[in-house]
Image: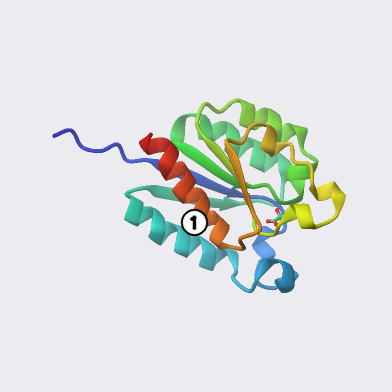
């Protein structure tokens, strides 16, 4: 029997997400990014996937990471933080990818200020998960899994 393809998934986080746990916990919860990363890695292993969990506060670095994702990954899960609402550069980089993109927001951005209602990333995302707290990353892994198994 042929062996199942090992899927590698990029989970990319934008600015200020390194401050989860101390940053507005009423909005974003008490889990820090390391705890979220550990949970995601555990769940990805159950699905038979490996993940690279990355974070950067720098727009250009995020662009470079996305460009490099072109050949290395089967899917991208991205929480672009505030750059989701502002960055045409992230949108253009994501347009290079021919793999499924799932957008995640920990908070329900549609319950918040109107400047958070628009996302450039949504234009290229297969779907958006928001408002489920850190569990949104797990939901996104499930979504990628469904897309890759289709
Ligand atoms: C966020 C929502 C953004 O509006 C905000 O700038 C963030 C976090 C979220 O996960 O809910 O940094 O992406």
Q: Is residue 40 above or below residue 73?
A: below
Q: Residue 102 in the image: state x and y as whole percent.
A: 57, 42
> Which residue is found at the position 30% from the left and 36% from the top?
5
Q: Residue at x 36, y 37 (%)?
A: 149
| Residue 48 in the figure: left or right of residue 101 | left
| Quarter residue 46 falls in | bottom left
> In front: 97, or 130?
130
Which quadrant of the structure image shows residue 73? Answer: top left
As drawn, is 76 to the left or to the right of 47?
A: right
Q: Position of residue 71 (x, y in %)?
A: 46, 29
Q: Which quadrant would the N terminus be assigned to in this image?
A: top left
Q: Nearer the viewer, residue 137 or 22?
A: 137
Q: Residue furthest right?
A: 114
* Quadrant, the C terminus: top left
Q: Is residue 26 above or below residue 103?
A: below
Outermost residue toward the left in this view: 1
Q: Nearer the viewer, residue 115 or 37?
A: 115
SS for dot 1: helix
Q: Position of residue 97 (x, y in %)?
A: 55, 28
- In the displayed structure, would residue 56 be above or below residue 76? below
Q: Residue 53 in the image: state x and y as whole percent.
A: 51, 52
For label 1, the residue is 138
Q: Quadrant of ligand 1?
A: bottom right
At 75% across and 45% down in the image, what residue appears?
83
Q: Residues within 10 Å of mark 1 (few under 14, many from 20)?
A: some
């Amino acid at each position: 029997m042929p062996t199942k393809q090992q899927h590698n998934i990029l989970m990319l986080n934008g600015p200020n997400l390194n401050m989860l746990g101390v940053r507005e916990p009423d909005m974003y919860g008490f889990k820090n990014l390391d705890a979220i990363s550990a949970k995601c890695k555990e769940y990805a292993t159950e699905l038979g996937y490996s993940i690279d969990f990355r974070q950067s506060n720098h727009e250009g670095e995020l662009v470079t990471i996305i460009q490099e994702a072109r050949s290395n990954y089967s899917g991208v899960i991205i929480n672009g933080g505030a750059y989701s609402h502002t960055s045409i550069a992230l949108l253009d980089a994501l347009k290079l990818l021919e793999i499924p993109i799932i957008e995640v927001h920990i908070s329900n951005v549609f319950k918040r200020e109107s400047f958070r209602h628009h996302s450039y990333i949504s234009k290229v995302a297969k779907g958006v998960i928001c408002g489920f707290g850190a569990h949104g990353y797990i939901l996104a892994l499930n979504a990628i899994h469904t897309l890759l198994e289709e």
